[in-house]
Image (cartoon, rainbow, N blue to C red):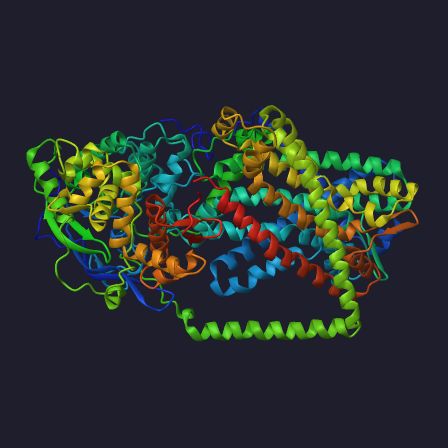
């Protein structure tokens, strides 16, 4: 009987370090030291922080990058905790579901900058300390990561196959064990994918999160984001080059150390067991698998999973669950009534808050701004589609090209495109171009890749037989595109376009107002409106802009993307 | 023979009394899927629940497992009412239902982990179960690395390792190919016969008649709509049983006869269809491709049958599973192309004519019978004829059907009528617009 390939090895409890252990050891301890170093600043006072200005020296970037990365990680952990609790509650409680899911939908559409209203709250929490500012920054990053992760987890929990649920019930798995043995593993592939998306979203906004001005309060935390902000202020293209290089390295490290292993292990959790996908290879995963040190950690974790299960006699009488007393009709009425009441009060408060400052005519103006941004997003998505769909199909049909291009596209999607803003902006300033047109491409700089790599995936998924049939019948040229290529990639394209559109709306806030040194370029639009009212500390207008933007995004999702997605799913599915 | 001889004087392991299951439809009416089922299972017995899909046999199994609560009646296990998943009742699933992220060993251990069995004992028992079921050497494999047969072995090991009194099997062999299923069945029967399995009794749900006769000591035959036990057959052949044995063949023949018996004259409770006598559109239509219908009529028409065939024989010859054969035979009966009774299928005059015609004539004949004998087809055709636009949305008929049946049945019924209507060119259907129309693409 061979047991040596078991993840939790029994036969090798004796600890003999091996080559992979050394590497794992070094990496783990480097991580500890670096975390300790980065955490050191937390206890310091804000005064000292202000006294030590950001340095533009390239060598300072190492420390800055480390601190930024740590913030990202902490925010990611917080997002995971949020995901596991919020989404689980939404999926398991019918009453909670009715409010939690729509709430998530709106939260997802709220631009992160609008959350910066909360920064004052965090600063007051720990007066004069850096910790409050750090918490605020981490919270802002969190708001750019958590929502889609939670939604993906909720969706997975709702789509666990019936038989697996029945197995869990038949063998009487406790809730704790069921969560870790069934629900989390099942949700894993989608969750990992969303974590990656969240991470790149986080990188995008880290620049905004580290250097924030709300009215008279400005907080500048040491990190890559503040470094870039300073470099822009001083028009230092060299420093920006260095920052891009540093970010490149950090993202590469994240990719290699965190996401490659995660995606590779996600294959383990896939349900379609005949998957013809070639298994992902990731050296970091190999290291973790082979390292006995880390397998001890895994063992401890597995023991923890079992901890929730007390010994029960195997042949006990059938268990009788307690009668669900909370199922009563009146509880429903009370609950929905309370929700309605809270909703009405909130609506009243918001209306009063906004209307206390803003004239109704201005609301109309803001809606017009919304349509301007909508026009921009629509044109950009159309342009990106025209460019990337043909290229994506071309690449996807060539496995060799796809294997080279796909990781690059994925990397580019993770790369914070706003690092490239200064280069574009300096060009716009120098050539005296119209901001209303030339700032627009910035919105889609980072999000166009979602269209590109989804189309690649779609094209490479076209069944060879379909392609051969096409060739055999002599279908080529425009007919080939119309009848074979475009329909085949359509569902994938729609998924990519939805992501790209959502991202572009969010990006409008950083893309419609940009500065280069003393020069500030502003394009007309809802994003610029929100950005300007935030930095002016005008809460009423920030709230107004945010509400309008959320309404735009959610309405667009409901009336345009959702039917399109449903249609793509229905019409182009072969089964 | 079984290690534990069926002893009628032993206290029953399982006692099911008057179990009913109904669902509440959106309009508040009840839809009965299971009606007044009684069943007693004694130690040493294997009982087979035999019926077509939709006869509620899986629902009954899930009620016994405590996974679904019956709407009426009682499930008693060892004298206690089952009101939730009970220790001592383990289940094997049609789709294997293995956790793809756990190895064979981890999958098998799952039930013991849930019981909180100490690690060493857990490992020992799991390895024993793995050995017993013939998975030795595959402990560290992941389900995706295994063939279907090996996966189902894991399913068996996982159920056996908790030493259940009662093993529930939900069509455990139907997702496997014929040869693999045969091997696994025989292995199981050998272990059972040798008394090596840590179980006391088995309840098997199947739609494979041969399998039922081979494995079970008693068969309960279910009718559909609503599901209820129409007859019980004792199988008193000694194990191992051989399919060529004349007594075995005779039993199979008997099961076919029971399954094709006309419903007795008792009033059918529940279905609303009776209240709207004459409309009859509330009949659930099981989807059978017109290809299968044509093929069956041709086969019965040809020698040596010449218009009349024995169902078990034709099933074997045409490689038709019971789940395909019965709906096909019933569809032909509904369309008045054939008569089914006493385990035989006999083509009517129209059926013979159909089998001897060319494509165009066949379509015309089929269209005539479809409109005349299938009330839903007639109804759709009438609505289309009456409307000036000659189109009608699918939802219109869907809503009507939902008054009589569950959502999935309505969906399936419409799918069937669309497919038959298309074949007969009686009406057209546009999936993009989700609408019926009279115009066929020229």
Inspect this view and state whether residue A416 appears.
yes
Seen at 91% across and 41% down, the residue is: A431
Position of B427 with respect to A34 (left or right) is: left
Seen at 31% across and 32% down, the residue is: B149
Seen at 24% across and 47% down, the residue is: B331
> Which residue is at the front of the view, A117 or A316?
A117
Q: Position of residue A352 (x, y in %)?
A: 73, 75
> Which residue is at the front of the view, B21 or A131?
B21
Using the rendered view, name the quadrant where residue A115 is placed: bottom right
Quarter of the image containing the C terminus of chain B? top left
Q: Position of residue A416 (x, y in %)?
A: 74, 42
Inspect this view and state whether residue A151 appears.
no
A535 w.r.t. A503: above or below = below
Position of A404 with respect to B353 (left or right) is: right
Q: Position of residue A406 (x, y in %)?
A: 63, 32
Position of A489 with respect to B220 (left or right) is: right
Using the rendered view, name the quadrant where residue A65 is placed: top right
Using the rendered view, name the quadrant where residue A195 is placed: top right
Q: Position of residue A250 (x, y in %)?
A: 72, 36
A167 w.r.t. B176: above or below = below
């Amino acid at each position: 009987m061979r047991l040596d390939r078991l993840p939790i090895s029994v036969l090798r409890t004796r600890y003999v370090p091996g080559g992979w252990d050394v590497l794992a050891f070094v990496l783990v301890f480097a991580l500890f030291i670096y975390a300790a170093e980065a955490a050191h600043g937390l206890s310091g006072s804000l005064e000292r922080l202000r006294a030590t200005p950001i340095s533009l020296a390239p060598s300072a970037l190492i420390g800055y990058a480390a601190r930024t990365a740590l913030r990202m990680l902490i925010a990611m952990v917080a997002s995971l905790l949020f995901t596991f609790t919020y989404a689980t509650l939404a999926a398991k409680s019918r009453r909670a579901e009715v409010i939690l899911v729509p709430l998530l939908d709106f939260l997802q559409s709220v631009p992160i900058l609008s959350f910066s209203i909360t920064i004052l709250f965090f600063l007051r929490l720990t007066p004069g300390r850096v910790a409050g500012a750090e918490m605020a920054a981490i919270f802002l990053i969190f708001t750019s990561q958590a929502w889609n992760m939670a939604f993906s987890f909720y969706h997975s929990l709702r789509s666990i196959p019936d038989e697996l649920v029945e197995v869990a019930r038949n063998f009487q798995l406790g809730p704790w064990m069921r969560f870790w043995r069934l629900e989390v593993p099942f949700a894993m592939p989608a969750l990992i994918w969303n974590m990656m998306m969240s991470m790149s979203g986080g990188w995008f906004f880290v620049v905004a999160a580290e250097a924030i001005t709300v009215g008279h309060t400005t907080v500048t935390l040491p990190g890559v984001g503040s470094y870039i902000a300073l470099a822009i202020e001083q028009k230092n293209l060299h420093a920006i080059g260095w920052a891009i290089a540093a970010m490149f390295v950090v993202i590469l490290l994240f990719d290699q150390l965190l996401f490659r292993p995660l995606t590779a292990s996600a294959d383990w959790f896939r349900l379609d067991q005949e998957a013809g996908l070639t298994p992902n290879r990731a050296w970091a995963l190999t290291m973790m698998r082979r390292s006995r040190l880390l397998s001890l950690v895994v063992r401890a974790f597995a023991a923890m999973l079992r901890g929730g299960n007390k010994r029960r006699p195997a042949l006990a009488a059938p268990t009788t669950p307690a009668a669900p007393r909370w199922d009563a009709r009146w509880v429903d009425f009370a609950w929905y009534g309370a929700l309605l009441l809270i909703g009405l009060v909130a609506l009243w408060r918001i209306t009063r808050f906004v209307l206390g400052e803003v004239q109704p005519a201005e609301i109309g103006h803001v809606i017009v701004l919304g349509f301007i941004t909508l026009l921009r997003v629509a044109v950009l998505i159309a342009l990106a589609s025209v460019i990337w769909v043909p290229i994506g199909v071309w690449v996807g049909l060539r496995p060799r090209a796809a294997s080279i291009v796909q990781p690059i596209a994925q990397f580019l999607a993770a790369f914070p495109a706003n690092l490239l803003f200064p280069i574009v902006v300096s060009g716009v300033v120098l050539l005296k171009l119209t901001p209303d047109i030339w700032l627009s491409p910035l919105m889609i700089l980072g999000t166009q890749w979602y269209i590109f790599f989804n189309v690649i995936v779609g094209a490479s998924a076209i069944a060879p037989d379909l392609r051969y049939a096409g060739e055999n019948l002599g279908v080529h040229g425009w007919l080939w595109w119309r009848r074979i290529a475009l329909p085949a990639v359509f569902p994938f394209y729609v998924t990519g376009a939805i992501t790209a559109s959502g991202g572009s709306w969010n990006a409008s806030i950083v893309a419609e107002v940009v500065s280069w040194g003393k020069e500030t370029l502003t394009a007309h639009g809802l994003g610029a409106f929100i950005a300007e009212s935030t930095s002016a500390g005008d809460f009423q207008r920030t709230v107004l802009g945010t509400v309008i933007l959320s309404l735009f995004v959610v309405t667009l999702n409901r009336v345009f993307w959702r039917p399109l997605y449903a249609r793509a799913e229905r019409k182009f599915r072969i089964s | 023979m079984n290690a534990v001889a069926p002893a009628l004087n032993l206290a029953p392991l399982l006692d099911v009394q008057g179990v009913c299951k109904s669902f509440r439809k959106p309009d508040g009416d009840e839809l009965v899927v299971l009606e007044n089922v009684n069943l007693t299972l004694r130690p040493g017995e294997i009982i087979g629940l035999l019926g077509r899909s939709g006869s509620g046999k899986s629902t009954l199994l899930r009620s016994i497992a405590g996974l679904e609560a019956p709407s009426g009646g009682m499930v008693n296990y060892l004298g206690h009412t089952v009101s939730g998943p009970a220790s001592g009742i383990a289940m094997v699933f049609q789709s294997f239902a293995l956790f793809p992220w756990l190895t064979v060993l981890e999958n098998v251990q799952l039930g013991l982990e849930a019981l909180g069995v100490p690690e060493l004992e857990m490992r020992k028992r799991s390895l024993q179960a793995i050995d017993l079921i013939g998975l030795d050497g595959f402990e560290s494999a992941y389900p995706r690395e295994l063939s279907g047969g090996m996966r189902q072995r894991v399913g068996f090991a996982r159920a056996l390792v908790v030493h259940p009194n009662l093993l529930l099997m939900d069509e455990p062999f139907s997702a496997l190919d014929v040869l693999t299923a045969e091997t696994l069945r025989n292995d199981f029967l050998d272990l059972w016969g040798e008394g090596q399995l840590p179980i006391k009794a088995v309840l098997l749900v199947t739609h494979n008649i041969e399998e039922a006769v081979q494995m079970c000591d008693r068969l309960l035959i279910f009718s559909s709509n609503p599901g209820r036990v129409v007859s019980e057959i004792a199988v008193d052949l000694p194990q191992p049983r051989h399919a060529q044995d004349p007594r075995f063949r005779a039993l199979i023949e008997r099961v076919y006869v029971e399954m094709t018996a006309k419903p007795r004259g008792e009033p059918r409770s529940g279905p609303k269809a009776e209240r709207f006598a004459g409309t009859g559109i509330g009949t659930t239509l099981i989807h059978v491709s017109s290809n299968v219908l044509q093929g069956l009529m041709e086969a019965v028409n040809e020698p040596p049958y010449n218009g009349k065939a024995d169902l078990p024989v034709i099933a074997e010859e045409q490689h038709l599973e019971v789940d395909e054969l019965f709906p096909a035979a019933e569809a032909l009966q509904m369309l008045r192309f054939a008569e089914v009774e006493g385990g035989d299928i006999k083509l009517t005059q129209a059926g013979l004519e159909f089998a001897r015609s060319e494509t165009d004539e066949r379509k015309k004949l089929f269209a005539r019978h479809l409109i005349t004998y299938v009330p839903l087809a007639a109804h759709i055709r009438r609505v289309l004829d009456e409307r000036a636009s000659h189109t009608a949305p699918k939802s219109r008929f869907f809503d009507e059907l939902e008054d009589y049946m569950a959502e999935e049945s309505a969906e399936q019924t419409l799918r069937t009528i669309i497919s038959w209507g298309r074949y007969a060119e009686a009406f057209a259907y546009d999936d993009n617009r989700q609408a019926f129309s009279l115009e066929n693409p020229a």
